[in-house]
Structures are given as C-alpha cells and as structure tokens.
Amino acid sequence: MAILSPVLMLAACAASSTALESAQAVQAEAASPFVGSWDGSSFETAMFLRLNEDRTFEWALTVGGLDMTAQGNWRAEGDTVTFASDPVPVPTTIALIGVNDNPGGPMLRVFHENGDPVEHSSTLTKCADGQTFLGRVGPEGSSPNPEQCPDPVSVRVLIPGVEADWPVFDLAENGWQPGKTIRFEFQPGDCGVMDFTGMAARLEGDVLTFTEESGGDTYRRMKPPE
C-alpha cells in the first residue's frame, strides 16, 4: 500500500477543505431566504419580482396602460438586499434642440428623433406670477393662453402614458423670448425599462419591503405550486 508523504497529505487535506468550503458556499447561496418569487400587487396594479439563485433578478409592473420591466443583479447583506440594473437602461427624456425666430408661431414644438412632430404631448408652463398651467401640444406646436399666462418663465414637456423624470426648462436661460419657437425632442431611450440601481429592500419573514428612498413597496413571498 502506498503511503503519502506529509506534504502530499497536507495538500490533499487543503484541497478537500477548499472543495468543502466551496460546496458549503454554493449550498448557502441556494438556501438564501431572498431567492424566490415575490408579489407586490395591489388594487389595479400587478407587480412581481423574481430573485434567482444566480443572483439575477427580473421585475415587472402593469398598471392601467403602463407596462414597466427591470432586470439585473442583486446582493444580500444580512436582512437587506440591494439591486443593480444590468444593463443600465438609457433614460427616457425630453431634450432641447434649438430656438428659432418664428413671429406669430407657437411658443414650442415637440419632435421625434426622426424629425417628425409628436402628435400628442402636454406641457406644464409656469408663469411670472407663480401660477402653473397644463397645456396640450399637437403637431403644430402650442402656446399658453396669453390671458392666463402673458409672461411664461419655464416649461416642462410630458409625453402621456410614458413614465420619466421630465426636466424643467427655464425659457429665458435657453434663449426663448416672444416671437421665437423653442424646439424639443422626445428621446425614448429604453422606454418602459426601470433602473433599479441603488434600490434596497429589507426582509422580515415572508415580507420584502423596499426602503422609502426606493419607493416603499411591499412584496410577499409567493408559495411554489404544489
């Protein structure tokens, strides 16, 4: 019978120990209490979150005519899980593309990236007296009611049915004055994809609650079908 030298025996023990630690780590990951399907639905809102054993996640939301999704990676630390979208979605936004002389024309117009006018959009126009008015924008553009808002100071353009952090544009700072038209472009980016990067949730029993900074939504563990 062959007898292993002390050096070989130590090497074999070290290898066995490493293999055992790796197996235990894999088993611990598989047994993570975060892994599974979570239901955050409420009245008229369907919202689901899936945390996979390979540390990836998928999320989906449907409310009215709005559908949103997200995907990426998750990391657990104690009773808290944090998320990072992968790939990071390109945000949907409205961009200023120019100001041109246009006596008698509309205050603003909104275009698609291909240059076609947006058929339907909305504006929130703030006036010098501090009031804000909601307006509708068609293909030919739009101007605020001069009787309600003779001196507009800023505008925010919104696309109905699209969730985004729409920016506010100061009109004077961007070169607009009466007799000019300010032109905006709708940039859809990854429209309908939400960025989960930096979001966090805390686990308590079978309830996963997102922090207030992450929206505060609550999800309950879904039991696997029997």
Image (cartoon, rainbow, N blue to C red):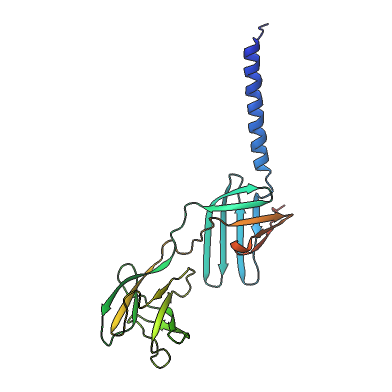
Q: Is residue 183 visible?
A: yes
The residue shown at (43%, 91%) is: 148
Picture layout, residue 223 above or below residue 55: below
Q: Position of residue 52 (x, y in %)?
A: 60, 48
Question: Who is closer to the viewer here, 205 or 48?
Answer: 205
Q: Position of residue 54 (x, y in %)?
A: 58, 44
The residue shown at (43%, 85%) is: 127
Picture layout, residue 54 above or below residue 102: above
Question: Who is closer to the viewer here, 24 or 129?
Answer: 129
State the image quarter where residue 26 is shown: top right
The residue shown at (58%, 46%) is: 55
Picture layout, residue 9 above or below residue 170: above
Q: Position of residue 188 (x, y in %)?
A: 41, 65
Question: Who is closer to the viewer here, 175 or 221?
Answer: 175
Picture layout, residue 94 above or below residue 147: above
Can you name the residue that lies furthest to the top here?
1
Q: Is residue 121 visible?
A: no
In the shown orientation, is residue 155 left or right of residue 2?
left
Q: Where is residue 8 in the image (x, y as percent from the top left)?
A: 62, 14
Can you name the residue that lies furthest to the right here?
205
